[in-house]
Image (cartoon, rainbow, N blue to C red):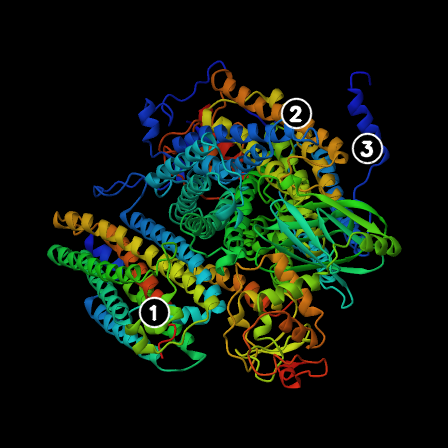
């Protein structure tokens, strides 16, 4: 039973976890450092890009999505997609309000 | 009754091998049960994403409108505490992931250790958060409770922050909007902390059960799914840290 | 040739099977602690009917007040509380859970050949949450009610009313979680619990519709939850997020609110559409015309449903560019509904149609939903929306969709599956009468409201200029008839529990898996785990099966 | 018909004789709106007829009695494409047509006369530039484009004139506008259509459309003595606005003469047209709207001026064509001297061209 289980489910080992942990800590250091550098317009974008990179690492490896079924991947994508709809469609209003009446 | 026999000829045999005790009656196999539970957990996390989505939307709108207020507000946050907390949470995510591995490979003592470490790191995170909150309360930066604009109208009255960032004084109408920043700060981190508290509560319960060997006999679904929840909390924090603490530190 | 497809067992010898989900266990606790999806569905059915009649009584009060132009029955603030509670109870405690939580709960596992929903305890939990929310809403009504309108518009709800916004908000919040858990449960069940051979394109359209609705429940409901949390915090602490005097934008609340509440109308209508697909197919003995198109139109409605919410805010001061975008997308979401209507109509083509009660309700649905849907386009087109929004035209439009559409579908479904749920038939003649009465009463109630709206009568008015009176009198008269139409089923359905004819396994000769087991079903639904070896709505398969069965029983 | 109550009978007769689907068309946009409405009603009726006809005829032709055995049909891609594309086409026509009307209703012509409307629980306050104040009533002339600038003091309200087919939300904290050109004299309904609390249904009034001559008479007879701009001037003085906005070379604030409608360069970068909404924001939240070349020193007036006060100030600034008036205001108040020359008084000739530099027409 247990062997069948281990075949059905990919078990991610400590090695991967350690690598990801280190990558996440490096990412944290990097994002803090980047926030002290004046990059103007790019500051928030870089902060968000690093955060997204870190989040991807967590999702893919700590949460095993890399090794999961298509359904799980699709679920994650669906969540991100709806989240983006909420934000982007709301911002269509807020951004274009500044354009004046027409 | 007769109709129910219609399929008798071509129906699959009922699951008959001896079932593990944790297999619930309406599932055919443990794989199906674990799959269903895992998928349900992912869907639950989607609802959490959308729940925080509302807050992130509000944050984006007001950050665009009142950028200077958000910068000054964010300078009030202690970046050292914030970074430490990020590291603590990432570390706890790591110990949680290791806990899942221990459960999957049936290492009972390892699992208990990992869960206990996660529990401890979670408490550390909340402890640091409390310190940060206390500072805000002392400076009257809690919206709705005698909110004070002092630090923004007269930055030099707040020497610790001033010596680091040399913020210019905000004009009163912009300074007022720091209250919005702190509203969102408390909402987002508070909602996050609430999730942490719930998570820590469940962790405590899991440690007790793990010591009894409940998760190391082939039925590790609960640990795996809780792991998903814990990592999700970590992800939310990763974004909160970038958005609330690191708006503009230069 | 007879004009009915009902085939009942010989009443003299037929018995309700001794072992079924109702008789398996006894006592109140066995119901309150059950994890059987069918029992939970019955619990929902009872509680939802209860809330429906409370909401209906409030609607009666509204119509009575509007009989005359003055405010003579109640003061304006009472009137405001009445319509607010009518909206909140009907939407959050009747329409959103109605079909999914009763019929969906009961039949999704049966249709896909599963023993239960994937998460039975969560299912029970969501009923308890629903009840907690509902009772809290009733409690709010007892302690003085709330008068914000069901939309909780800020800053009215946060700063300007002194009624029980917080308890109402909490009630809606809790009911929201009940809805999330139901939707989550359905998605997992449909993905993971299908019987062998039950591929996606062999699923009944009822399942597709519920799948689409569940996606909306899971993804949209949390946003209204956070919006309500923000209103509560704004009201208690003054955090400023929606307060214009503190720099907040009250419109942001509406964005968050409608991000849920627009998809919510699809949460309400999609399961109803699923019912109609089943009913039309069964009573015309035909596979649904263009199965794939109907299935995908459900999913399309769910997806597009997320992109159109701001059409509730065209004149509220959102940017004109956003108005264009949302108006265009609204037009797109109208198309899948049109596809469904025509596909159902053509399912009748070359069918073999009978006119039992569920079919009558389904015809009612198609007519009324067509009107409701088309008038939705009036409101989705930004220009005409200016004149029609916030008037009785809106009221009539969403009642045509919700009451004319959803409620008709709910009643169609209840009648259709009543024999399966209880093992007994409802009385046919009186229920056909009830269907006709409902249809007439409905039209008389809500059609005049279209004209009132075109004439400019604003919604949520306790008093109105006298020239609108005659149409309001029509409407109130219609509401009385409608009330009778709704009371009748309650009476004869309860009557049928004891005196109805024994239905047998498959009185309608329908093809769904739920009909291939005993009525009422066993607790585990099927004596033998079913295997799906044919397409959905395969009436030839059914005939063949029955022939074989006839041979077998003759031997 | 004796069993019908005579009152209802009377109503019925009256209603049937005056039967209407739409209110009278009393504005220029109304016939255009109605054309689209009729088109939509027509399309709906045709659609509904098709559906009902098909259902009825199929029900008759293929009832079980006549047609005992159903013919199984999978579907028809051609048919399905037809009823996807035709409704889509019709809906897109309605979208474009509707968008054109929306565009017209919310794009006032440049020469429109402006009337301010303040909504509050539960009344409409209408302020004409000439100083006429009305409550729950609006007088407008025929043949003249009228722009309404709406704002709410508390909650959302909605200013609806069904006979004109226009409606606009009055929002707290922000101006919205709508315009119309009345065509037929008469008295029409004015409703608040956004639910606004207890007496929502009493927030109603009359819109009186008059011929231009009558309107002139009405204007003359109902003036309160001081125009909005004069009210604004008083407020401008009492709030000491002229301490900075005084058009001197060393002024701390930009000159306000001719500022209305001009394109301003902002300190934060970017440009903005100084319209009503901008002026209101600049008074209440000045730091976000600082003109280039000036320090963000202006205090906020949030909570110190009523919405009517802001309107008066804006009207004053709108009519401020040269700096002379500000100088007059300056003299009328006891301000600490900002620079020499205050005491001496300033003649109209002494305009400050330097300050004009901030205004880029």
Question: Which corner quadrant holds the N terminus of chain C?
Answer: top right
Q: Residues within 10 Å of mark 2 (few under 14, many from 20)?
A: many
Instruction: Looking at the picture, tell me which residue is in the foreground, C518 or B121.
Output: B121
Left or right: residue D22 versus residue D341 is right
The mark total stands at: 3
Task: Look at the image and tell me whether residue D258 can be seen.
Answer: yes
Helix, strand or loop at mark 2: helix
Task: Look at the image and tell me whether residue C10 can be seen.
Answer: no
Rendered location of residue B76, percent (x, y): 33, 69
Rendered location of residue D176, percent (x, y): 65, 59
Helix, strand or loop at mark 3: helix
Pinpoint the chain carrying mark 1.
Answer: B
Residue at the spot of label 1: B245
Whether tag 1 and tag 3 are in contact, CB under 8 A, the answer is no
Which mark is drawn over residue C38?
Answer: none
Image point (46%, 35%), residue name: C102
Residue at the spot of label 3: D15
Question: Gap between marks 2 and 3, in whole Å?
Answer: 22 Å
Helix, strand or loop at mark 1: helix
Question: Gap between marks 1 and 3, in whole Å?
Answer: 67 Å
Image point (63%, 77%), residue name: D255
Whether residue D101 is situated above or below residue C348 in the rendered picture: below
Image point (36%, 72%), residue name: B155
Question: Gap between marks 1 and 2, in whole Å?
Answer: 62 Å
Whether residue C414 is situated above or below residue C151 in the rendered picture: above
Rendered location of residue A91, percent (x, y): 53, 64
Instruction: Looking at the picture, tell me which residue is in the foreground, C15 or B102.
Output: B102
Q: Residues within 10 Å of mark 3 (few under 14, many from 20)?
A: some
Whether marks 2 and 3 lie on the same chain: no
Q: Residues within 10 Å of mark 1 (few under 14, many from 20)?
A: many
Whether residue B61 is situated above or below residue C342 in the rendered picture: below
Residue at the spot of label 2: C481
């Amino acid at each position: 039973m247990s062997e069948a289980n281990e075949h059905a489910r990919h078990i991610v080992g400590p090695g991967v976890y350690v690598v990801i942990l280190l990558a996440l800590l490096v990412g944290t250091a990097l994002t803090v450092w980047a926030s002290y550098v004046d990059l103007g317009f790019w500051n928030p974008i870089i902060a968000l890009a690093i955060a997204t990179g870190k989040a991807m690492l967590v999702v893919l490896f700590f949460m095993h999505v890399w090794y999961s079924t298509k359904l799980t991947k699709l679920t994650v994508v669906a969540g991100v997609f709806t989240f983006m709809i909420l934000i982007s469609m709301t911002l269509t209003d807020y951004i274009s309000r500044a354009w004046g009446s027409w | 009754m007769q109709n129910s026999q219609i399929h008798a000829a071509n129906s699959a045999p009922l699951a008959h091998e001896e079932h593990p005790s944790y297999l619930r009656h309406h599932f055919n196999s443990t794989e199906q049960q674990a799959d269903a539970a895992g998928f349900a957990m992912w869907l639950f996390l989607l609802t959490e994403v959308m729940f925080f989505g509302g807050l992130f939307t509000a944050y984006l709108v007001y950050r665009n409108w009142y950028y200077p207020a958000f910068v000054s507000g964010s300078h009030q946050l202690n970046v050292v505490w914030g970074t430490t907390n990020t590291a603590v949470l990432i570390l706890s995510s790591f110990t949680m992931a290791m806990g899942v591995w221990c459960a999957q490979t049936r290492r009972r003592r390892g699992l208990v250790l990992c869960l206990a470490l996660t529990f401890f790191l979670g408490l550390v995170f909340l402890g640091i958060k409390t310190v940060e909150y206390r500072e805000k309360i002392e400076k009257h930066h809690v919206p709705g409770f005698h909110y004070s604009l002092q630090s923004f109208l007269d930055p030099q009255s707040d020497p610790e922050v001033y010596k680091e960032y040399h913020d210019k004084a905000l004009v009163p109408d912009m300074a007022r909007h720091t209250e919005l920043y702190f509203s969102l700060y408390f909402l987002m981190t508070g909602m996050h902390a609430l999730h942490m508290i719930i998570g820590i509560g469940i962790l405590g319960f899991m440690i007790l059960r793990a010591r009894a060997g409940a998760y190391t006999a082939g039925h590790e679904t609960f640990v795996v799914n809780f792991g998903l929840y814990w990592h999700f909390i970590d992800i939310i924090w990763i974004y909160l840290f970038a958005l609330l603490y690191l708006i503009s530190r230069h | 040739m007879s004009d009915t497809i009902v085939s009942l067992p010989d009443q003299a010898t037929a018995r309700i099977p001794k072992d079924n989900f109702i008789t398996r266990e006894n006592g109140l606790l066995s119901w309150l602690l059950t994890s059987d999806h069918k029992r939970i569905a019955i619990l929902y059915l009872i509680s939802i009917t209860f809330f429906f009649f409370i909401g209906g009584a409030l609607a009666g009060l509204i119509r009575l007040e509007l009989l005359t132009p003055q405010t003579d029955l109640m003061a304006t603030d009472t009137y405001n509380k009445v319509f607010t509670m009518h909206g909140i109870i009907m939407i959050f405690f009747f329409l959103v859970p109605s079909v999914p939580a009763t019929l969906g709960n009961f039949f999704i596992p049966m249709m896909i050949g599963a023993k239960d929903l994937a998460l039975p305890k969560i299912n029970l939990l969501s009923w308890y949450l629903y009840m907690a929310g509902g009772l809290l809403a009733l409690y709010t009504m007892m302690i003085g009610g709330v008068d914000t309108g069901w939309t909780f518009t800020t800053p009215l709800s946060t700063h300007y009313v002194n009624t029980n916004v917080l308890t109402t908000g909490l009630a809606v919040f809790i009911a929201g979680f009940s809805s999330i858990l139901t939707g989550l449960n359905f998605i997992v069940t449909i993905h993971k619990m299908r019987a062998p051979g039950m591929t996606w394109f062999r699923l009944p359209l009822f399942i597709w519709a519920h799948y689409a609705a569940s996606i909306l429940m899971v993804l949209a409901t949390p946003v209204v939850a956070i919006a309500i949390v923000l209103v509560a915090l704004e009201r208690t602490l003054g955090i400023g997020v929606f307060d214009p005097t503190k720099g907040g934008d009250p419109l942001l609340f509406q964005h968050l609110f409608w991000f849920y509440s627009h998809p919510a109308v699809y949460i309400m209508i999609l399961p109803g559409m699923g019912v109609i697909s089943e009913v039309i197919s069964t009573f015309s003995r035909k596979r649904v015309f263009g199965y794939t198109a109907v299935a995908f139109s459900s999913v399309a409605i769910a997806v597009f449903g997320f992109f159109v919410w701001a059409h509730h805010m065209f004149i509220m001061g959102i940017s004109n560019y956003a108005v264009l975008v949302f108006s265009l997308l609204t037009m797109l979401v109208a198309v899948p509904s049109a596809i469904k209507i025509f596909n159902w109509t053509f399912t009748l083509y070359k069918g073999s149609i009978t006119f039992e009660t569920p079919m009558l309700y389904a015809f009612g649905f198609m007519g009324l939903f067509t009107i409701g849907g088309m008038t939705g386009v009036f409101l989705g087109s930004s220009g005409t929306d200016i004149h029609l929004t916030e008037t009785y035209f809106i009221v009539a439009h969403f009642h045509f969709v919700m009451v004319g559409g959803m409620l008709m579908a709910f009643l169609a479904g209840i009648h259709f599956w009543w024999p399966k749920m209880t093992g007994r038939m409802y009385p046919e003649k009186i229920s056909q009468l009830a269907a006709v009465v409902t249809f007439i009463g409905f039209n008389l109630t809500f059609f005049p409201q279209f004209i009132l709206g075109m004439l400019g009568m604003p919604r949520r008015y306790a008093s109105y200029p006298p020239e609108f009176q005659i149409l309001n009198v029509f409407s109130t008269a219609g509401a009385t008839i409608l009330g009778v139409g709704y009371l009748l089923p309650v009476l004869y359905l309860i009557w049928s529990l004891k005196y109805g004819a024994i239905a047998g396994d498959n009185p309608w000769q329908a093809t769904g898996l739920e009909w291939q087991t005993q009525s009422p079903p066993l607790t585990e639904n099927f004596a033998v785990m079913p295997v799906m070896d044919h397409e959905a709505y395969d009436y030839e398969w059914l005939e063949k099966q029955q022939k074989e069965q006839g041979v077998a029983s003759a031997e | 018909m004796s069993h019908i109550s005579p009152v209802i009978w009377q109503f019925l007769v009256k209603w049937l004789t005056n039967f209407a689907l739409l209110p009278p068309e009393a504005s220029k946009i109304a016939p255009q709106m109605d054309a689209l409405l009729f088109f939509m009603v027509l399309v709906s009726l045709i659609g509904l007829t098709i559906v009902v006809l098909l259902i009825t005829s199929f029900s008759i032709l293929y009832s079980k009695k006549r047609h005992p055995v159903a013919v199984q049909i999978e579907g028809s891609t051609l048919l399905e494409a037809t009823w996807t594309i035709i409704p889509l086409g019709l809906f897109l026509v309605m979208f474009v047509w509707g968008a054109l009307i929306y565009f017209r209703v919310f794009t006032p012509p440049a020469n429109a006369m402006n009337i301010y409307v303040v909504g509050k629980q539960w009344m409409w306050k209408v302020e004409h530039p000439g100083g006429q104040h009305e409550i729950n009533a609006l007088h407008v002339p025929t043949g003249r484009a009228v722009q309404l600038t709406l704002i709410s003091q508390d909650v959302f309200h909605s200013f609806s004139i069904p006979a004109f087919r226009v409606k606009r939300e009055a929002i707290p904290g922000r101006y919205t506008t709508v315009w119309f050109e009345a065509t037929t004299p008469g008295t029409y309904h004015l409703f608040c259509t956004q639910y606004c609390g207890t007496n929502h249904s009493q927030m109603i009034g009359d819109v009186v459309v008059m011929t231009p001559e009558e309107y002139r008479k009405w204007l003359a007879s109902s003036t309160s003595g001081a125009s909005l701009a004069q009210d604004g001037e008083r407020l401008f003085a009492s709030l000491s606005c002229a301490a900075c906005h005084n058009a001197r070379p060393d002024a701390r604030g930009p000159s306000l003469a001719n500022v209305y409608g001009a394109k301003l360069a902002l300190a934060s970068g970017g440009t903005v047209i100084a319209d009503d909404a901008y002026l209101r924001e600049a008074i209440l939240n000045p730091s976000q709207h600082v003109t280039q070349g000036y320090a963000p020193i202006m205090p906020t007036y949030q909570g110190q001026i009523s919405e009517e006060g802001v309107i008066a100030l804006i009207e004053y600034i709108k009519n401020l064509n040269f700096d002379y008036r500000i100088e007059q205001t300056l003299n009328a108040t006891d301000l600490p001297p900002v620079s020499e020359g205050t005491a001496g008084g300033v003649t109209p000739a002494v305009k400050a061209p330097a300050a004009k530099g901030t205004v880029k027409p």
